[in-house]
Amino acid sequence: MLRIFKLLLPAIIPSWRFFDVIAASPRIQYVLLNKQSENLSEWQEYTARLRQLNPITILKRLFWNPHWNEYLFLVSCAERIIANQNLSSGVIDNHHSEIEILKRIYRALFSHKNSFDDKGLYLQFRLLIVNRENTQTPVEVIFYSSAKSLTELQCQHGI
Amino acid sequence: MEFEQAYRLTQILTSLAFIQQSIEHIRLYRNEIIIFSSRIIFSLILLSGLYTGISLIALFIIALLLLVRFQGPYNGGADRMSLLVLCCLCLVQILPDRHWQEVAFGYLALQLVLSYFIAGWVKVINPEWRNGQALSDVFGFSVYPVSESLRRLSSSHHLLVVFSWLVILFELLFPLSLLFQQSLILALACAAIFHFSNACFFGLNRFLWIWIAAFPSILWLQDRLVQHL
């Protein structure tokens, strides 16, 4: 009950400090692994950002924008993990944010497959930071997730 | 605008905003279908004007479940505003006395004004907003620009300084628009254009619809304050 109240309070008494400081920004990269250790591919950036958008698509997105909103949610999860990393004390629980990011990357990659063939594979992501000095190439890796089996992600998390 | 008229209009606009938000979720995950389908059903009931009390309470319970499900708002400020609007609508529904109903609805209007004024204040005290650097950073490396081509705007220094100050001045001066109904309507039109721009540049479409849903409350409050002066 206290947890719900703590989640509700910022909505009832909002701070409204939109874009007060433009802090370093997280990027999410993922990789497919074999047996939780061996990289099967290069780290790839996970993003919903396209190279270019035409005006018609932009107008359509006023009403239908699920992938971009999901991407912003994953950025929020990444920011929660980073905030936890910066805590000097206390119990750090990133489980919810980690699973949300992993299962949504999984769905983006494999949603077209009804049954997954490569049952031995694992998915892992890492978080990098981009700032004013490094806008093109994020250099600082600040978090590695645990590697989750694709089968587990498919079965346990309702994808 | 009369209280009943503004309250009902807020219900209608909120239910439409909730339907738009919920439809976006339906196709994503099996385990989210039930909760977002329920949200759509109760939003439709609210939209119809029948059983508004029951539908508002049900939508509030669903909102709490979603807070727990996502361990916070799914869509940041837009979800916080959605919850605030919903809380105020629920309070108006359950409070027995007209005076306290007006206080609850007035609180929504006050928060709407603060949402612009505080956002403007935190920008104007930041030198990086005043010299255009902050907006350049938003386009340059933040996660918000919806396309890579928009990142090029980060080097348009003079344009960004102008836009930074337009945003700052609009947000800071918004409370003054309450002095006259015409100025408030003009300010709300500017606000809608501002949210529309944010939706186009940064993909923040949910902000547009839920902030517009709160507009009737400020139109009513301005009318109410003028009557008292």
Image (tube, coloured by chain):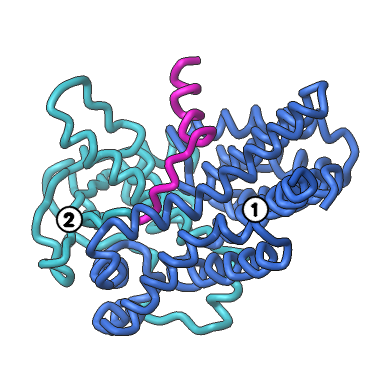
Residue B173: give x, y in percent of width and height. 50, 62
For badge 2, the amino acid type reads: Ile
Instruction: Give residue A129's mark.
Output: 2
Q: Is residue A14 magenta?
A: yes
At a point 69% along the width and 65% down the height, the residue shown is B185
Helix, strand or loop under label 2: strand
Magenta stretch, residue numbers = A1-19
Point out the frontmost of discs 1 and 2.
2
Residue B2: give x, y in percent of width and height. 85, 48
Q: Which chain is cyan?
A: A
**Circle 1 is placed at which residue position?**
B23
Chain on which label 1 sits: B
Chain on which label 2 sits: A
Above-or-below relation of B85 to B144: above
Q: Which chain is blue?
A: B
Where, by quadrant of the figure, is residue B155 drawn? Answer: bottom left
Q: Is residue B96 magenta?
A: no
Q: Is residue B140 visible?
A: no
Residue B29: give x, y in percent of width and height. 53, 45
At a point 37% along the width and 69% down the height, the residue shown is B145
Judged from this view, the residue extending furthest toward the front is: B229
Mark 2 Cα-neighbour bin, 10 Å: few <14, some 14–19, many ≥20: many
For badge 1, the amino acid type reads: Ile
Q: Is residue B158 visible?
A: yes
